Amino acid sequence: MSTQEEWKVPFFNYPYMFISQEEAFMSVIRDVGRRGAFIMQKDLADFEANLAAYTGGKYAVGVANATDGLQMALMAGGVGPGDEIIFCSHTMVATASAIHFAGAAPVPVEAGPDHVMDPEAMEAAITPRTKAILPTQLNGRTADMDAIRTVADKHGLEIYEDAAQALGSKFNGKCAGTFGVASCISFYPAKVLGCLGDGGAVLTNNEEVCRKLLSLRDHGRDDDGDVVMWGLNSRLDNLQAAILDYQLRDYQKVIDRRRAIAALYQERLANFEQLVLPPAPDSDPDHFDVFQNYEIEAENRDKLRVYLKERGIGTLIQWGGKAVHQFRKLGFTQSLPFTERLFERMLMLPMNMSLSDHDVHYVCDCIIDFYWK
Ligand SMILES: *Cc1c(COP(=O)(O)O)cnc(C)c1O
């Protein structure tokens, strides 16, 4: 099981992502290449406008990756030394590192039963130094932003979002990434909207924050090329922007397919007491999930994982099996028992555009066999 071809159902099929759209991608690449349009050209501006329109937000700023994007979002919003930022520990270490490199202190809290930030745990972590709440819209699901907004308003806190996994996900009809001061989206190849390498965007409705972001990503320069602040070099390549803009046109189909796969998993696996499934696609009118991942909880998780591997099915435990606060070398001392227990049980099943219905049935058959033997 070492190479991609030996898997019956790989967890993610990277070549498929390119090959399934190869001709269209090649013509985009040829077009951009022949124009020599590599850095901050029209394709980037077009993509930013289309992305903002898609999310219903005012501004989108293309950046090199979501991690830089989140750091710059916090910097542009005025987060810095002395501030504490509350985030959910079931997230990529990138969420915490963005807070750290913005100069603030990352404060991890528990996930809830749907694996996104638990609003009650969040409120309990507030101190006089807390500046903002930073939920991760994980697995393509948006946290309960009404509850988070209520707590934030009560304590005079700002909201930022790690929406790296959640482009198109909604809570009460409003897109992930548009609830607070600013947010980040990731275009890493395996993300719901992926490019051919690293890429990201920052969303904001605030003109001043947008202006700062445009400078921060480009060496601190303004439109006239004058250096007006310390900045980074963290631009979204124009070529990647063109590839993303092309794919954004058919993005609804991608979301529809992912939700159909989730519905199929739900239909086949809902009745097993050994499993806890993510909320089904239409189970709650407040949430519209885009299923970046299909993360289940499973009894005997490690044995199930081996059993599936022996049958050619790739699975993954998110973040290498640890919540962020469990990376003790980063200085975290918190104990978050609910989240730690989740990490003993969670497993991600294949969820991507290369899956046929037949593949999904095969995965479900093997899971059912495992629990019935
Ligand atoms: C992928 C991801 C990131 C990082 O995105 P990059 O574009 O790779 O920097 C951050 N947070 C979450 C929740 C992610 O899934």
Image: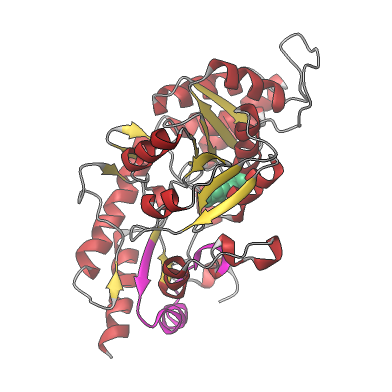
Q: Is residue 317 magenta?
A: yes
The percent position of residue 69, horizontal first and vertical second, equals 62, 36
In the rendered image, the quadrant that contains the C terminus is bottom left
The percent position of residue 18, horizontal first and vertical second, equals 54, 47
Per the rendered image, the range of residues in magenta is 295-320
| Left or right of residue 27, residue 151 in this image | left
Which residue is pictured at 71% across the width and 33% down the height? 234
**Residue 193 sits above or below residue 346 on the image:** above
Q: Residue furthest front?
A: 128
| Left or right of residue 210, residue 237 in this image | right
Res 56 → quadrant: top left
| Left or right of residue 19, residue 122 in this image | left
In the rendered image, the quadrant that contains the N terminus is bottom right
**Residue 370 sits above or below residue 218 on the image:** below
Which residue is pictured at 59% across the width and 37% down the height? 200
Which residue is pictured at 68% across the width and 39% down the height? 102
Res 239 → quadrant: top right
The percent position of residue 55, horizontal first and vertical second, equals 41, 28
The percent position of residue 41, horizontal first and vertical second, equals 66, 19
Q: Is residue 123 magenta?
A: no
**Residue 109 sits above or below residue 359 on the image:** above
